[in-house]
Image (cartoon, grey):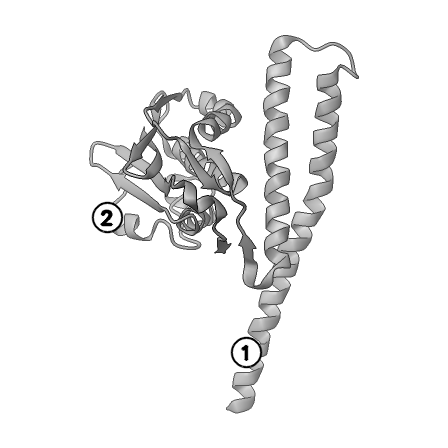
């Protein structure tokens, strides 16, 4: 029995090591083509291959921003697997939630247009900045927006709101999409939980899980609300206390 337990434990450890090595290797291998795409797009924008029209420039700039974001995410992922147990240290810089929201919408706008979804942003926050990791906070907003567009009904409106509650800066969106039962709401941020298949979508259930970990690592809270009239709200709130800019915070995935 002891031998069997030891063998099982070692097998589990080996499998975990193999999984981490695989993810790290794939992330590393993806960095080279991503950097090549960034360099090529920069050359296009500099006019190295001839003049480009203003509307072409706009699209190329959005694609370039997306590639830079992808590269930052790959660097973050590699850093995660270089550290013990997938823990990374969060950076502390002043981050404007409103600016990030606009940036993310610009990068996702063509996905929304493909479904004729109109995205509207309302900013009533007197204090819209927080101190935290810009790449990771952007990751949260991108995950929420991606889900919001993916599940929203065609020809609908996705409303984004940035506002303050006490000493928190809040981001949330409201869309028209299928009702989420209380049971599903309770587990929607759990690891590997995805309802994409039920809606004929693709998903592995890591985006919302990672978002929850990131928001909580910043001392915040992520939430979901759903109503029978097909209104769904996803959002998060993060403290905007300036004293947090010197704090040391980590997140473990």
Secondary element at image label 2 = helix
Q: In the rendered view, does 168 fall on the left or right side of 72?
A: left
- 10 Å crowding of disc 1: few (<14), some (14-19), many (20+): few
Q: In the rendered view, does 209 fall on the left or right side of 173?
A: right
Name the spot of residue 163 as percent of width and height, x first: 32, 30
**Can residue 140 be seen?**
no
Q: In the rendered view, does 81 fall on the left or right side of 128?
A: right
Name the spot of residue 229 as percent of width and height, x first: 21, 32
Q: Hey, which quadrant is residue 160 in on the image?
A: top left
Name the spot of residue 81 as percent of width and height, x first: 61, 57
- 10 Å crowding of disc 2: few (<14), some (14-19), many (20+): few
Residue 50 vertical position relative to residue 32 in the rendered view, above or below:
above
User: Toward the viewer: 146 or 78?
Assistant: 78
**Can residue 20 be seen?**
yes
Q: Hey, which quadrant is residue 243 in on the image?
A: top left
- The residue sitting at 52% across, 90% down in the picture is 2
Q: Which mark is residue 127?
A: none
**Residue that carries the numbered disc 2 in the rendered image:** 182
Q: Reading the chain from its start, which is encountered first: label 1 or label 2? A: 1
- The residue sitting at 62% across, 54% down in the picture is 23
User: Toward the viewer: 126 or 41?
Assistant: 126
**Residue that carries the numbered disc 1 in the rendered image:** 9
- The residue sitting at 56% across, 59% down in the picture is 86
């Amino acid at each position: 029995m002891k031998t069997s337990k030891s063998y099982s434990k070692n097998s589990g450890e080996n499998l975990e090591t193999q999984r981490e090595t695989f993810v790290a290797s794939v992330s590393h291998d993806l960095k080279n083509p991503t950097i090549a795409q960034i360099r090529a797009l920069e050359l296009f924008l500099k006019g190295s291959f001839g003049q480009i029209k203003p509307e072409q420039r706009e699209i190329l700039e959005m694609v370039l921003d997306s590639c830079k974001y992808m590269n930052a995410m790959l660097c973050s992922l590699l850093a995660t697997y270089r550290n013990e147990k997938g823990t990374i240290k969060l950076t502390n810089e002043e981050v404007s939630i409103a600016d990030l929201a606009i940036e993310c919408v610009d990068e996702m706008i063509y996905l929304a247009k493909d479904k004729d979804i109109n995205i509207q942003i309302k900013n009533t926050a007197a204090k819209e900045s927080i101190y935290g990791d810009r790449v990771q906070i952007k990751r949260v907003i991108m995950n929420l927006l991606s889900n919001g567009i993916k599940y929203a009904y065609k020809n609908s409106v996705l409303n984004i709101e940035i506002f303050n509650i006490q000493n928190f800066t809040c981001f949330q969106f409201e869309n028209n999409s299928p009702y989420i039962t209380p049971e599903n709401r309770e587990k929607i941020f759990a690891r590997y939980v995805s309802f994409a298949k039920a809606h004929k979508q693709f998903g592995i259930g890591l985006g919302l899980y990672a978002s929850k970990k990131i928001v909580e690592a910043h001392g915040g809270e992520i939430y979901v609300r759903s109503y029978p009239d097909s209104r769904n709200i996803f959002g998060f709130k993060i403290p905007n206390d300036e004293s947090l800019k010197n704090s040391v915070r980590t997140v473990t995935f």
